[in-house]
Amino acid sequence: MFNVTRLLDVESGERDRVLTAIRTVAERSGALRWIVEPTDTGSRNGGDVLAHLRFPDESAWRIAEPQLAAALADPAITRINGATYAGTPIGTGKPATVYRTLLLRVQPDTSTQTLTRFESELKSMPGYVGTMCAWQLSRVTEPTGSTEWTHVFEQEFTDVAGLMGPYLMHPIHWAVVDRWFDPETTEVIVRDRVCHSFCAIDRAVLQP
């Protein structure tokens, strides 16, 4: 599948109108799955609105792209972070109520061997976190925003508690994966601020 994620900062009095406009475009886009929702409290650099669309391939996205671009040109949208990327999600079949995405940028001088270790450790996390219902790690095709994003790590969780507790507080997270993000370690490869954004969902986004 080909995926499109946009995190939107929106003027407070205009958020409902922008939500409606972006949802209308998403519904007509031909996306196989999509969500356009307000971000939850606890998101970090995650915008006010999270839009995510999944197309069968890149050509389907290119057909829809002009309509979404026109909607995102709304002057009430003050900042956009995002990415387009290919990928195939892995699901457990468990029902989820939260979708979360993480945009990050790996330093360009990172060696291939180190990058492979980093990606392998991220991919290992679902094996330790029972509240994760689906996930996908992807390399970015086209970044959007002031940061040249290189990766998108997205998941579905049973609920917010399952994200904030068993996932973010699990030893695999703070004892293993966090060293790649910690400027006080010698292994840090993610120095730019990340986008950690999540929202409520009432239907599966990553799962078939």
Image (cartoon, rainbow, N blue to C red):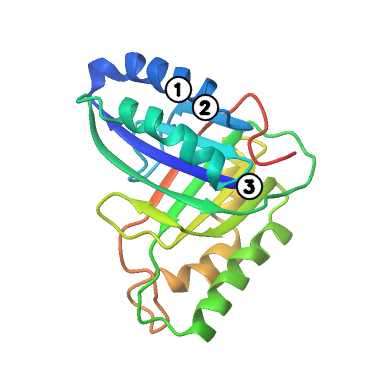
Three-letter residue code for mark 2? Ser
* Residue 160 image-quadrant placement: top right
- Across and down, in percent, residue 138 comes to 55, 58
The quadrant of the rendering that contains the C terminus is top right
> Is residue 9 toward the left or the right of residue 165 in the image?
left
In terms of depth relative to the viewer, which is nearer, 197 or 25? Answer: 25
Assess whether mark 1 and mark 2 are in contact (beta carbons under 8 angstroms).
yes
Q: Residue at x 38, y 46 (%)?
A: 82
In terms of depth relative to the viewer, which is nearer, 71 or 169? Answer: 71
Residue under pointer 1: 25
Graded by Cα atoms within 10 Å as few (under 14), some (14 to 19) or many (20 or more), the crowding at tag 1 reads some
Which SS class for mark 1? helix
Three-letter residue code for mark 1? Val
Tell me which numbered mark, 2 or 3, is placed earlier along the sequence: 3
Label placed on residue 1 = 3
Three-letter residue code for mark 3? Met
Tell me which numbered mark, 1 or 3, is placed earlier along the sequence: 3
In terms of depth relative to the viewer, which is nearer, 69 or 91? Answer: 69
Graded by Cα atoms within 10 Å as few (under 14), some (14 to 19) or many (20 or more), the crowding at tag 3 reads few
Q: Residue at x 22, y 24 (%)?
A: 76
Q: Is residue 55 above or below residue 152?
A: above
Residue under pointer 2: 29
Q: Is residue 20 above or below residue 88?
A: above
